[in-house]
Amino acid sequence: MNKISPLASVSPNAKLGDNIEIGPFAFIDENVEIGDGCVIQPNAVIYPYVKMGKNCHVFPGAVVGAIPQDLKYEGEITYVEIGDNVTIRECVTINRGTKASGKGVTKIGSNTLLMSYVHVAHDCVVGEHCILVSFVGIAGETVVDDWAIVGGGAKAHQFSKIGCHAMVGGMSKINKDIPPYVLCGRDPICYSGVNIVGLRRRGFSAEVIRNIKDIYDTIYFSGYNITDGCAKVEAGFPQS
């Protein structure tokens, strides 16, 4: 049974699952799908063409599915897709995709946490089990792979990619791709080592972690440029 405040505004054309809670002054527009067990707290806004999975929690002031902040947008129908068990904290903004990108959809993977004031721009893809800490902003078409953590206040340039299991330091300016499994930060942003603690927590064996470290030592600390370092890794390390 759903628990919907009489002070909430919910379109009759919204598709709601079971056991949903919607607080006072929340706004759910038409052409919205919300999965079972979701909680939409007071003053949250969900605009059209948002599909949300099960057991998501949207906190006050969040705005999901607003039109993209892109001058190439021409009013076309585009989407936001959100997985299961996603937490969207206070004043987070998630914009829809654009036709011009060739994607037309912004995606948030399951079990991801978006802390307060995070901005996810048009056509971004945020993977599963990610954490974007407060005030992170990722520009259009940024990709954040599974299990990545982006520290508070960091900003990602358009088309950037952040690799899986990477950890980016707070306030970083992400203007280049971040490889998987690494720690990075400083200004200009640079490689700071392997995310050993994070990999241990996620069940990586000591041997695998050592191999990852050896690969990055070859790329960054052996005197090669990046191209030659990558070639050396491809020739000298087994495929996995």
Image (tube, grey):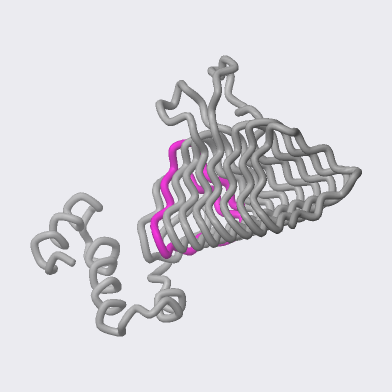
* Identity of the residue drawn at 59% across and 56% down: 54
In the rendered view, tell whether residue 79 sits above or below residue 134.
above
In the rendered image, residue 224, in percent from the top left (x then y), is placed at 20, 58
* Identity of the residue drawn at 55% across and 23% down: 77
Residue found at the very far bottom of the displayed protein: 206
* Identity of the residue drawn at 39% across and 48% down: 177
Residue found at the very far left of the displayed protein: 235
* Magenta stretch bounds: 154-175
Q: How many marks?
A: 0
In the rendered view, tell whether residue 137 sits above or below residue 110.
above
Of residues 209 and 98, the one drawn nearer to the viewer in this rendering? 98
Residue found at the very far right of the displayed protein: 7
Residue 115: tell me if it is visible: no
Determine the image quadrant of residue 214: bottom left
Of residues 118 and 155, the one drawn nearer to the viewer in this rendering? 118
Residue 75: tell me if it is visible: yes
Quadrant of image for the C terminus? bottom left
Q: Is residue 6 left or right of residue 1?
A: right
Of residues 26 and 16, the one drawn nearer to the viewer in this rendering? 16
* Identity of the residue drawn at 47% across and 42% down: 142
In the rendered image, residue 42, in percent from the top left (x then y), is placed at 84, 50
Of residues 65 and 225, the one drawn nearer to the viewer in this rendering? 65
Quadrant of image for the N terminus? bottom right
156 falls in the magenta region:
yes
In the rendered image, residue 50, in percent from the top left (x then y), is placed at 60, 38
In the rendered image, residue 112, in percent from the top left (x then y), is placed at 55, 59
Determine the image quadrant of residue 96: top right
159 falls in the magenta region:
yes
In the rendered view, tell whether residue 87 sits above or below residue 213.
above
Residue found at the very far top of the displayed protein: 74
Determine the image quadrant of residue 16: top right
Magenta stretch, main secondary structure class: loop
